[in-house]
């Protein structure tokens, strides 16, 4: 997680410097870096969620992946809703006027550019900070899975 998001941070920093008016192709240089972070985020988070579900089952005896999945995707949707709501506010804050040509409002374009790079960068740094103490290693996840499999095997033997 931390490595993938660090690559994303490199992309956001590159994007700030490569977002050059009149040269949209330069944006493509940064795209793989921050896209890697965004794309890997969903893959890694679902894997981490599965590990947490296994630990929860080990501790409680209940398999509650539906609850964890619902909370996870609800939070994703809340994040998208907040981002959608903020987009209008940000456009207003930077003073963008859709009736003017972009070249006539460079300060608004600079503001949008800063928001487009700054918010994802800060959010990614916060996510890395929050996840820095995530303690479920591959070894611990495999041990948890083995304990659950042994528990299920014992339950199968005792009910047979």
Image: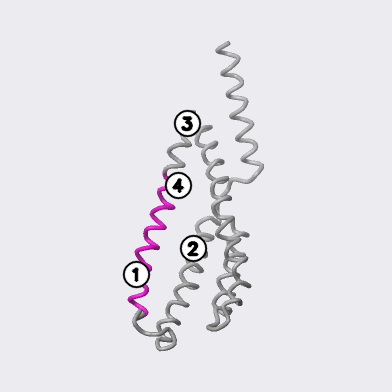
Q: CA distance from mark 2 to mark 1?
A: 23 Å
Q: Quadrant of the N terminus?
A: bottom right
Nearest to N terminus: mark 2 or mark 1: 1
> Dots 1 and 4: beta carbons under 8 Å?
no
Camera-near label (4 vs 3) is 4
Q: What is the secondary structure assignment of the residue under circle 3?
A: helix
Which sits in the foreground, 65 or 30?
A: 30
Q: CA distance from mark 3 to mark 2?
A: 30 Å
Whether residue 125 is situated above or below residue 20 in the rendered picture: above
The residue identified by callout 2 is 126
The residue identified by callout 1 is 88
Q: What is the secondary structure assignment of the residue under circle 4?
A: helix
> Dots 1 and 3: beta carbons under 8 Å?
no
Number of residue marks: 4
Q: Horizontally, is 89 left or right of 38 in the view?
A: left
The residue identified by callout 3 is 60
Camera-near label (1 vs 4) is 1
Nearest to N terminus: mark 4 or mark 3: 3
The residue identified by callout 4 is 72
Whether residue 159 is situated above or below residue 68 in the rendered picture: above
Q: Residues in magenta?
A: 71-94
């Amino acid at each position: 997680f931390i490595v993938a998001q660090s690559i994303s941070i490199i992309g956001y920093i590159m994007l700030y410097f490569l977002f050059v008016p009149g040269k949209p192709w330069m944006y493509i240089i940064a795209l793989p870096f921050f896209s890697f972070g965004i794309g890997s985020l969903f893959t890694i988070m679902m894997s981490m969620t599965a590990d947490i579900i296994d630990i929860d089952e080990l501790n409680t005896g209940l398999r509650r992946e539906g609850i964890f999945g619902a909370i996870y995707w609800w939070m994703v949707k809340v994040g998208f809703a907040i981002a959608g709501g903020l987009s209008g506010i940000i456009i207003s804050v930077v003073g963008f006027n859709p009736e003017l040509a972009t070249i006539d409002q460079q300060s608004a374009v600079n503001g949008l550019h800063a928001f487009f790079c700054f918010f994802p960068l800060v959010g990614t740094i916060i996510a890395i900070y929050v996840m820095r103490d995530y303690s479920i290693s591959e070894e611990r996840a495999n041990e948890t899975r083995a304990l659950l499999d042994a528990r299920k095997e014992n339950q199968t033997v005792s009910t047979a």
